Amino acid sequence: MKVTVQDTEIIKNIEPQQLREYLQSHGWHEDRPFLENATIWHKQAERGEFEILLPTTKKLGDYLPRIRELIQTIADSENISHLEVLSEFIKNYPHLKIQGFVTKIATPNPDKLSGEVTIVCPVFEKICQIKTELLDHDYILAIKSYQERLPVRCTGDLVKENNTFILKNPQEFQIENI
Amino acid sequence: MDINQQKEQLSNAYLQAITSVAGYSLYKPAVDDDSVDWGIAARGIMGRIRAPRLELQLKSTSRDVLNDKAIRYPLKLKNYNDLRMVDFAVPRILIVVLLPDNLDKWVQQSEEELCMRCCGYWLSLGVMPEKQNTSTVTVTIPRNSQFTVAALQSIMQGIGQGVQP
């Protein structure tokens, strides 16, 4: 399964504060300022010492290339792909097509044929749990795919709320032809 | 190969020669910016980029842009604006390499030496004003702003100490 990613959309929405918090919680230490608009961070990893230039504001002419570099350096230091790092910083991603398995059906809503389902699928190469609210025919398909362990696909707007991925406006929910 | 590609390659060689002797490494920046051709950084282990660092646009010309005191180079407005902005994390400069008109004179080689003609000049556009021009802005680079090993080392040391080029 190959997902094509327009990572520019994600990168330009990443806040410096998000990156700062990530670096602090992943063994990086802030070393010193670099001119007016960035700080230098270092990490001693298994593969040697790594350096990152973290912009202090988004309002920079070179914000995009700096963040792209930073994501790549984190990926190199942890020996993972840059997409995997990128997935840490997604706050929202519209019109995302996902393909995975339904792993949980929550208690159905009492008033109409609908309910929350959990789909496990790769989001930018990282396996994630995504919750989505399905109605009517889509909901029945989700139950069928859950019972028969059939893969599903769906398109929607991915958002991250309280560290949980939620697929809003789910559309084209269907069981994969296998 | 057309003559413009040859000019570009020779100016790359000039930049590589100066950067190598000055003790820094060159890197190709991310694809997002067409006004940056090269980055210069302190050498890192396994080719990793390290501060201090600098990014640049490299131009070459064999036109008669040199007078007694300065080089007057017509720069595309987009490049002018992309190099002029003050708010960058990594500072930017423009380098213009002047080449002889006649390709036979670009290099002269013997057992003793390889002589490369002519010279590169550098300019920081950081403080330059916004222009209303529509296509190009002619920038003036003093003749004493030659892009030499010593000049590059001085720029990089300055950046390391918090001084914009």
Image: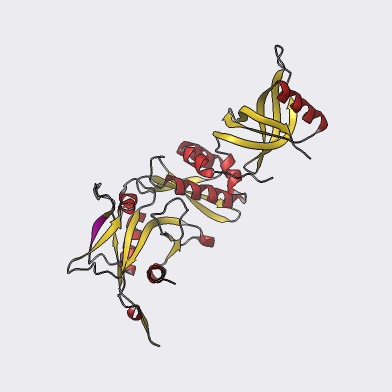
Residue B140 on the magenta span: yes
Query: Which of A159 and B105 lies nearest the eye of the viewer?
Result: B105
* Residue A95 spot, x, y in % from top left: 58, 34
Check the image and tell me how it is coloured: secondary structure
Query: Which of A55 and A166 lies nearest the eye of the viewer?
Result: A166
Residue B124 on the magenta span: no
Q: Residue furthest bottom?
A: B111
User: Of helix, strand and loop, which mostly describes the magenta segment?
Assistant: strand
Relative placement, left or right, of A101 versus B86 is: right
* Residue A51 spot, x, y in % from top left: 49, 52
* Residue A38 spot, x, y in % from top left: 40, 46
* Residue B67 spot, x, y in % from top left: 19, 68
Q: Quadrant of the N terminus of chain A?
A: top right
Magenta span: B137-143
Residue A109 quadrant: top right
Q: Quadrant of the C terminus of chain A?
A: top right
Q: Residue furthest top?
A: A111
Query: Which of A153 and A27 lies nearest the eye of the viewer?
Result: A153
- On screen, A56 above or below A45? above
